[in-house]
Image (cartoon, rainbow, N blue to C red):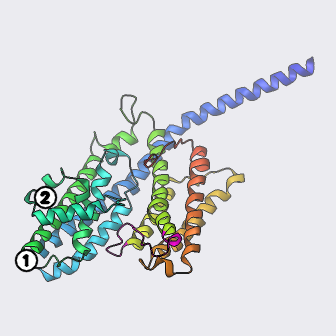
Amino acid sequence: MSKNRTMMRSLAALCLLAVVASMRVAHAAPAAFTKLNARVIDSYVIPGFDRLAKTSGELVDNLSRTCEGSAKAAKAVKKDFADTVLAWAAVEFLRFGPMSQIGRPERFDFWPDPRGVTQRQVAALVAKRDATALDPALLAKKSAAVQGLSALEVLLDDDAPPLTGTDEAAVYRCKLAVSIAQSTHALAREILTEWQGDAGWRHRMVEPSATDARYKTPEEPAGDFARALITGLQMIQDREVVPMIAVLQTPGKEPRLPFQRSGLSARYISAGVASIKSLYETMGLGRGVPSEKAWMPRWITAAFGRLARDAPAAVKGIPQAENNPDRARQLRMVRFHVEGIRKLIGRELAPLAGLTIGFNELDGD
């Protein structure tokens, strides 16, 4: 009996210690999450949208001068467009804050577009010489398919006469390209502005409130950052890896990849991988894991390195994808590492950090 009482007391003491320990963790967690939220927003999120606003602004300037006849500006447009695409790759998976508004990501880039809606609708605007599309404010009210980077890519890289032409169609196409670029730049500036100020998203996420409609605790914004990692990895899987695997399984079939027309697919996926890795490192999810799980962040770091090597190579040389004997192996390795990183972050590192991911932005699409 005495032995039982002793065991009961010991068990009670252990339970009490566990409760006290959990209380300590609960009190420490909000401060840690608050620092994490501020670090991610100030070091990654806002600089990313600031870069998008700057590159798209430079694109507007050089496109406008191109339409005025500047040969020098016309040469700069291709680089400006590439810079804007790569800046977009760094933030497109951040589907929280201002980007949680329905339709905004699609206005930046209407993709995936398996039926070629963008090309058809842009061609229709050109055929009609639709004057309303030349006003960025009115263009923003039209279909998302005629806004953003994929629509601009159609005008810059299709088989029609160049924007520098003097015929009526070329003049309209150039003005439409400027309008699309202006609309994209305005949207980037709008989102950047919405991060700032006392009522901005930064304040709401760093200092959540019980009265806030979206963020009531510091854990919720941190959970959105972790969810963004999963979303970004899923985008790589669904938009680059899966289409390429389908091509290899169907000889003669040409893949449809993001920014394929402009030859930016490999650089785009490379920028996406680097950006997801940067967000992961900024969050610090691999720090402070138990010793028995220390292999996980090491594996993730190595997997990101392999993705940086294999993912761009797997989509390079389109449309002769099926002729590359190494491509199937590269794609299998890309899929393996993407899935591995997703599972370790979603099932292990995020829960260890006290974060619940749940559904991500692309679930149900």
Q: Residues in magenta?
A: 247-264
Identify the residue at image location x=41%, y=77%.
319
Tag in front: 2 or 1? 1
Identify the residue at image location x=63%, y=62%.
299
Q: Residues within 10 Å of mark 1 (few under 14, many from 20)?
A: few
In the picture of the structure, the residue carrying the numbered disc 2 is 133
The x and y percentages for residue 249 are 53, 70
Depth check: give the residue in front, 30 or 342: 342
Residue 147 visible somewhere in the drawing? no
- Label 1 sits on a secondary structure element that is loop
Depth check: give the residue in front, 78 or 240: 240
Identify the residue at image location x=52%, y=72%.
248
- Label 2 sits on a secondary structure element that is helix
Residue 250 counted in the magenta span? yes
Marks counted in the figure total 2
**Rendered-image quadrant of the N terminus:** top right
Q: Is residue 221 above or below residue 122?
A: above
Identify the residue at image location x=53%, y=41%.
356
Q: Which amino acid type is marked by label 1? A: Asp
Q: Which amino acid type is marked by label 2? A: Ala
The x and y percentages for residue 260 are 36, 72
Depth check: give the residue in front, 179 or 191: 179
The x and y percentages for residue 44 are 40, 57
Residue 304 visible somewhere in the drawing? yes
Q: Which mark is residue 167?
A: 1
Image position of 226 (left or right of 109) = right
The x and y percentages for residue 152 are 24, 66
